[in-house]
Image (cartoon, rainbow, N blue to C red):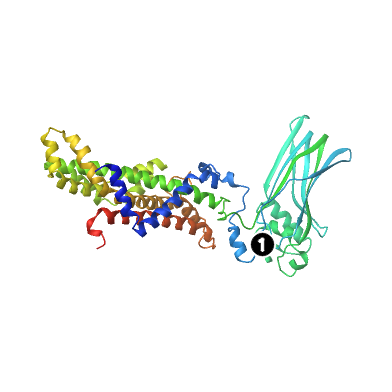
Amino acid sequence: MKLSTRIRDFWNEFKHRKIGMLGLGILVIIVSISVLAPVIAPMDPTRWSDVNYWTNNPKGVPPTWAYYIQGKVPIPQLYLENYKTKLTKISGYPMIQAFLPINYTYTEFPTMVKWRINLTFVGAGAFYEIYLMRPDKKKVTLYTGTATTSNASQGWTIIEIDATRHPDVERRINEWLSSMGLDINRIQPAAPIQIAFADLKLLKKNKLVPLKGEYVFTVRAIAQGKNINVTQFRVILGATAYGLLGTDKSGRDLFKGLVWGTPIALLIGVLTSVLGVAIGLLYGVTSGYIGGWSDEAMMRVVDILMSLPKLPILIVLAIAYRPTIWLIILFLTIFGWMGIARVSRSIALQLKESAFVEAARAIGASRKRIILVHIIPNIVPYTVAALALGIPDAILTEAALSFLGLGDPSLPTWGAILNQAQTGGALGSGMWWWFIPPGLAIAVVSMAFVFIGYAVDEIVNPRLRRR
């Protein structure tokens, strides 16, 4: 029978299996996400573990849609860059002021305050101060510092600070509160910088509520030389919600991690299963066809390998060697071919006594040709189900290793995201968006292949056909 006819007959049988079609539909969606990952979630997946890559994202915030479901309006991620400068002189020294205003109308505090300032000057050094003018005309000094150069030529400095939990910023805010007879320890904000945005009238009643109105972030710098200038002034106010799946405590976009985890999971599952089935099929058929003491010896090797505890050995190997995705695939393949080897051997023992094999042997066909041309093609349909069922097993095993911190640390695998959620205390802090999506993704992908494998097994195995 022609291969095209076999495939057509198989499809006609498969499409009447509802559970198989459901699994195929899920698989089509999964493959589409994998192919379109660079478009859906633009990112270099190797940058996942680079914390500096995500430094400007809000930390540990929920998805935007979850905020709206609760009836709240989230603060968006705000990038303030349209500043104005004013150059004057004080005691004969040049002084520059840069003003960056924002009309704050939100009912919650920003989750992050971060600024970047490029300051250039000519002279021995410069003194600078960063402060916030509030709507109630009160000034909050946030940071002060000096910039120096070893000669009288051009000098420059970059002031890049995450003020959310910066010790110097926190100290100055404490000093500002103390000057008004207030104590930050009685208020317990999420981040000390939020106090700078608080309504002082309510703060005295121990109520932490934002004061609405126009705020002005200001940089004032004085140079001990001829001139000074601010060439960049940017402030980032962190959102209270972010994207489709929120962020983790390092600011990583979990939607991008979930999307890029899909092709990685498929690569691990499919490649491991294909290699395992191919090795097991060839090994089992060769053992069954040769027979005798060679068959016994080869099967004892299978028995020994099957008796070994897979996961503990994989853990030891992952600890002993630096885990990469290719090394993990190799380890999973080594422990993933024995089952199909036993099945293919038992079928080969039956086929080698069949008439078409006897005929091939009679006309002088070599052992290699009989195995590759006559026996294996007749066993392949029985291995399709094993191929489909081997994929979720590989995905789950890799996820288990990554969850234990023994996977490839440079890639956003679903198991690695779960490991980061566990070490980051996501469950205890209620950050459900960190651990539920990757767990569901593992379950859905595994379910798709199990459905397909069950439907295929039902077609090729007469004992499972519905009467």
Q: Observer-nearest residue: 214 or 441?
A: 441
Residue 381 position in % (x across, y down):
27, 48
- Residue 239 appears in which quarter of the rendering? bottom right
Q: Observer-nearest residue: 352 or 420?
A: 352
Crowd tier of the residue under label 1, counting other residues whose Cα lies within 10 Å: few below 14, some 14–19, many 20 or above: some
Q: Which residue is mark 1?
A: 73
Residue 220 drawn above or below residue 19:
above
Residue 311 position in % (x across, y down):
33, 51
Q: Observer-nearest residue: 219 or 253?
A: 253
Residue 428 drawn above or below residue 93:
below
Q: Is residue 335 visible?
A: no
Q: Secondary structure at mark 1?
A: loop
Asked whether, in this view, residue 158 is left or right of residue 325, the answer is right
Residue 286 position in % (x across, y down):
19, 40
The type of residue carrying mark 1 is Val
Quadrant holding the C terminus: bottom left
Q: Observer-nearest residue: 130 or 66?
A: 66
Asked whether, in this view, residue 419 is left or right of residue 118, the answer is left
- Residue 334 appears in which quarter of the rendering? top left
Asked whether, in this view, residue 84 is left or right of residue 386, the answer is right
